[in-house]
Each structure stands twice: as structure tokens, then as C-alpha cells.
């Protein structure tokens, strides 16, 4: 049954397949730029697998968007997800992001904050009416040691606004008290790779200092249900 789910989710190929990225570094808090590539095939797993459901309340997604003279910070909620294990080792998974939950955390004035959040949900940015979710499908996991936890390189497919790209990034996996915690970031992705082009000076040449940086900084903490 788990194998059938893997095949089905590979068609969806979620968040930027972790390929050919600048995956080294980041452990000191520096931002690692993740390059988008072609979607990847989900690695075949011959062993029996188990699915650990993601705790969508305890898990955290934080983002930063930059522009000349300032930046905005915010959060994004998870809708659902699971991590797939074989022989007590992370081998795959799928994370679904609720794009309608995108929220700003740095603007104190409620009217201005709602205006920004509404704009982010509009067709200019993530078009959440048409694309209510984004998702990441993990296609392969390589651990740096034999402990089946700790630092690892994750490959996967990221889908935003119906566009699927392959990405590669580093993660740190911890197991404690029957709960798995996976840390990702800070990393950055180029939003224009997924068709989020508003205010991009790499797309529009008449913006002068009115542009918004192409790269979005992301930090993720995933926790499974105990």
C-alpha cells in the first residue's frame, strides 16, 4: 500500500526537486541558495515502509521576502503530510502546504497587514484561489553517517502554482521520545522558477528601485505526531 502511495505522489512531484543545489553550508545560520532543476523520479524502496504523520500544528514554516529598504517576514501553515521510514531511516515523504494560510508577522497595523496578505494570495503572487496548496515530495535521502539520523541531503520535487521543479537541500533529522523532527534552512528559492514574477527585475526591466527580490528565504521545522 505504501509503495502504491509513493507511485501516486510521484506524479504530483512536489516542491523543487533537490538537484544540483548549493547544499553545503547553512549549518552556521548562513542562507543556502537552492537551485531549481528538472523533476526527479521517486527512488524505489524494496523494504517495507511505514508512514509517520506530520503534526501540522507543531510544525513551523517561516519566510522572509526582501526589497530595497526593507523586508517582510511571515509564516505558512501545513495542511497535511507524512515522513516515510524503512528500517528506522527516513526514505521519503510528502508535505502539503496551505497557501491560503500565508501570513505576515512584521506589520503591526492590521489594515496594512491584511492588504499585504491579500496581495500575496492574489494572481500577482501565489493565486491561492486557483492553487490552494503547494507540495513537496521527497524522492531520495542520503545520510552523512550510518546512524540513520543527523545531517542528510534531501532530494525532492516542489510544486508551486502547478509548476514542479526538482531541488536538493540539506536537513538535520532528530529522533526523540517517539517523535521525528526535521530541520531545514535557512535556504532560499527563486520564486520566478515557479512563475511568481510580480516585481521581479529579472523579468521586468522598468522597475528601477520598485523591485522585490527574486529569492525567498525559508526555514522549516517538521514534527511528526507522537
Image (cartoon, rainbow, N blue to C red):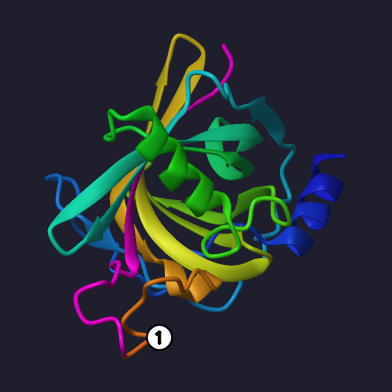
Tell me, yes or no, if residue 148 can be seen here: no
Give residue 176's position: percent from left, percent from top: 41, 15
Residue placed at 86% from the left, 49% from the top? 4
Q: Is residue 35 left or right of residue 88?
A: left
Q: State which quarter of the image contains the C terminus.
A: top right
Give residue 219's position: percent from left, percent from top: 33, 42
- In this rendered view, identify the residue nearer to me: 86 or 100: 100
Kindly give the residue lying farthest to the front in the view shown.
Answer: 111
The secondary element bearing badge 1 is classed as: loop
| Figure check: 74 above or below 129 | above
What span is colored magenta in the figure? 206-226
| Figure check: 56 above or below 166 | above
- In this rendered view, identify the residue nearer to me: 169 or 136: 136
Give residue 8's position: percent from left, percent from top: 83, 54
| Figure check: 85 above or below 17 | above
Tell me, yes or no, if residue 110 can be seen here: yes
Q: State which quarter of the image contains the N terminus.
A: top right
Q: Is residue 117 left or right of residue 199?
A: right
Residue marked by disc 1: 203
Give residue 198's position: percent from left, percent from top: 44, 71
Q: Is residue 216 magenta?
A: yes
Amino acid at each position: 500500500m505504501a509503495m502504491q502511495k509513493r507511485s501516486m505522489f510521484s506524479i504530483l512531484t512536489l516542491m523543487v526537486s533537490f538537484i544540483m543545489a548549493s547544499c553545503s553550508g547553512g549549518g552556521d545560520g548562513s542562507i543556502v541558495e537552492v537551485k531549481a532543476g528538472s523533476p526527479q523520479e521517486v527512488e524505489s524502496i524494496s523494504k517495507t515502509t511505514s508512514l509517520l504523520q506530520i503534526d501540522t500544528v507543531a510544525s513551523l514554516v517561516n519566510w522572509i521576502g526582501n526589497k530595497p529598504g526593507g523586508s517582510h517576514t511571515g509564516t505558512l501553515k501545513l495542511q497535511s503530510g507524512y515522513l516515510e521510514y524503512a528500517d528506522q531511516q527516513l526514505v521519503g515523504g510528502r508535505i502539503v502546504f496551505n497557501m491560503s494560510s500565508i501570513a505576515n508577522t512584521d506589520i503591526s497595523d492590521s489594515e496594512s497587514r491584511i492588504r499585504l496578505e491579500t496581495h500575496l494570495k492574489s494572481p500577482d503572487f501565489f493565486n491561492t484561489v486557483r492553487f490552494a496548496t503547494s507540495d513537496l515530495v521527497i524522492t531520495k535521502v542520503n545520510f552523512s553517517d550510518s546512524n540513520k539520523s543527523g545531517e542528510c541531503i534531501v532530494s525532492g520535487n516542489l510544486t508551486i502554482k502547478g509548476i514542479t521543479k526538482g531541488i536538493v537541500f540539506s536537513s538535520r533529522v532528530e529522533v526523540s521520545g517517539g517523535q521525528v523532527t526535521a530541520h531545514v534552512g535557512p535556504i532560499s528559492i527563486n520564486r520566478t522558477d515557479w512563475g511568481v514574477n510580480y516585481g521581479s527585475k529579472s523579468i521586468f526591466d522598468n522597475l528601477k528601485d520598485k523591485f522585490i527580490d527574486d529569492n525567498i528565504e525559508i526555514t522549516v521545522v517538521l514534527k511528526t505526531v507522537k
